[in-house]
Image (cartoon, grey):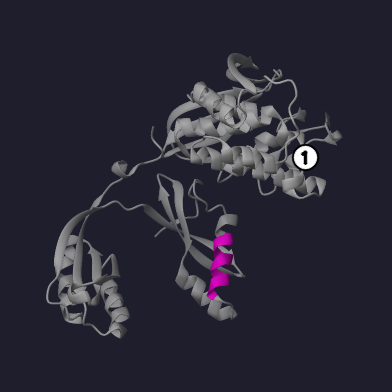
């Protein structure tokens, strides 16, 4: 199974745990793998089945979670965490499920004013929520989904009866989970449940439209109600991002020299000179040579057309008696700059992207250092502010490259 797939969640008609799970099953996730994962956490406690239904005339898969035990205990987040830790699960399934429950516990704790570890609430303790969350994470693993994003979430309107009494829609936990996410009413009644919203917030790296993908599967999961004029479904689009073998490569040359007798004060100037002369990168690696002498390996990566000039520069600027050379293939990610606001100024953020999807994000340190000097602040704090500003601007792994990006 490939492990560079991306899944985009369409929650424009709402989202619940069973709807999302149904969509992933419809997209090809193995229901047997899902059952095994759930049974590893709560053995023999629930049964899971799927049926094909229609919602407002559209075909969808409806998941049914049926408790197999007469009485389910009220569980806390601490209990769930212990269950996950002790279950025989793939590590990423365990981590993702834990992240969803942690989000849900944090929201419920804030709503009720109690420590997250001590909150008793049916949303986390109920068997159907356990099955939904663990099942969704197991389905993602079975599909080989590495990253996720999601669109705007319809949360509904009106009032509903809950275990805590009559509440407005969105219920307090959903409203808390929606902080920093785009939502809209989208219709009458409760359209987004706490479990569904927690899954999106914990698993999706960004809120946005469908990113560029080579589409491999589309899944549609049904809610329990069939609402005329509005398909009560969640859609999942699963696609493949470019792998290294799909990316264009370029020739490169690696120059290396082992040096044990150069004054270490000269090395910064040597590296800077190589970069100024056209090296793509230059670095030092500490080594131990014959007779136990400490030394460095100088590495220089460059285009083949620059190799001769850079080789001459190594001989000129260092004490080496020889340079070895090897041909390589270089597979670079596409790179771009995006400007973000930090402390009333602008910092350039370098973004690595793969077929339009962000994979790497890092503020340009020269910009950060210059701003820190100007404001008289530590570089460490200014870098943290720049990283936070980049995330707030939507520059996170899995998000689509914004339109204001410029080539690096």
For the residue pair 212 and 191, the one nearer the viewer reads as 191
For the residue pair 238 and 337, the one nearer the viewer reads as 238
Q: In this view of the protein, can residue 147 be seen by the observer?
A: no
- Residue hosting label 1: 120
Per the rendered image, the range of residues in magenta is 379-389
Q: Would you say 4 lies left or right of 68 here?
A: left
For the residue pair 148 and 63, the one nearer the viewer reads as 63
Q: In which quarter of the image is residue 198?
A: top right
Q: Would you say 2 lies left or right of 294 here?
A: right
Q: Where is residue 134 in the image (x, y as percent from the top left)?
A: 59, 33
Q: Quadrant of residue 72?
A: top right
Q: In this view of the protein, can residue 126 be seen by the observer?
A: yes
Residue 286 magenta: no
Residue occupying the point 65% across, 32% down = 130
Q: In this view, does 263 lie above or below 151?
A: below
Q: Main secondary structure of the magenta part?
A: helix
For the residue pair 204 and 353, the one nearer the viewer reads as 204
Residue 386 magenta: yes
Q: Which residue lies furthest to the right in this view?
A: 166
Which quadrant would the C terminus be assigned to in this image?
bottom left
């Amino acid at each position: 199974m490939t492990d560079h797939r991306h899944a985009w969640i369409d929650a424009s008609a709402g989202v619940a745990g069973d709807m999302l799970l149904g969509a992933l099953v419809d997209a090809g996730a193995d229901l047997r793998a899902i059952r095994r994962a759930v049974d590893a956490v709560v053995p023999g406690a629930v049964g899971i089945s799927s049926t094909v239904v229609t919602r407002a005339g559209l075909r969808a898969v409806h998941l049914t979670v049926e408790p197999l035990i007469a009485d389910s205990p009220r569980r806390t987040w601490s209990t769930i965490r212990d269950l996950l830790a002790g279950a025989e699960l793939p590590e990423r399934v365990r981590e993702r499920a834990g992240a969803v429950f942690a989000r849900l516990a944090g929201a419920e704790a804030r709503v009720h004013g109690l420590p997250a570890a001590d909150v008793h609430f049916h949303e986390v303790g109920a068997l159907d929520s356990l099955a939904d969350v663990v099942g969704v994470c197991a389905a993602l693993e079975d599909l080989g989904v590495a990253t996720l994003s999601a669109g705007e979430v319809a949360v509904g309107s009106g009032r509903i009866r809950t275990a805590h009494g009559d509440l407005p829609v969105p219920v307090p936990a959903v409203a808390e989970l929606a902080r920093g996410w785009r939502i809209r009413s989208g219709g009458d009644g409760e359209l987004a449940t706490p479990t569904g919203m927690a899954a999106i917030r914990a698993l999706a790296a960004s809120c946005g439209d469908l990113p560029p993908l080579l589409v491999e599967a589309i899944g549609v999961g049904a809610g329990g109600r069939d609402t005329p004029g509005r398909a009560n479904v969640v859609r999942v689009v699963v696609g493949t991002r470019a792998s290294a073998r799909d990316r264009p490569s370029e020739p490169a040359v690696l120059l290396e020299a082992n040096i044990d007798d150069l004054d270490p004060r000269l090395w910064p100037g040597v590296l800077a000179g190589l970069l100024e002369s056209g090296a793509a990168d230059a670095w030092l690696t500490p080594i131990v040579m014959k007779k136990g002498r400490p030394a460095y390996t100088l590495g220089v990566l460059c285009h083949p057309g620059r190799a001769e000039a850079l080789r001459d520069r190594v001989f000129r600027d260092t004490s080496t008696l020889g340079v070895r050379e090897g041909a390589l293939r270089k597979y670079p990610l596409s790179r771009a700059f995006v400007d973000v606001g930090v402390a009333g100024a602008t910092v350039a953020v370098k973004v690595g992207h793969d077929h339009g999807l962000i994979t790497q994000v890092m503020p340009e340190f020269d910009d950060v250092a210059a701003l820190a000097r100007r404001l008289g602040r530590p570089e460490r704090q200014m870098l943290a502010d720049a990283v936070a500003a980049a995330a707030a601007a939507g520059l996170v792994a899995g998000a689509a490259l914004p339109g204001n990006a410029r080539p690096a």
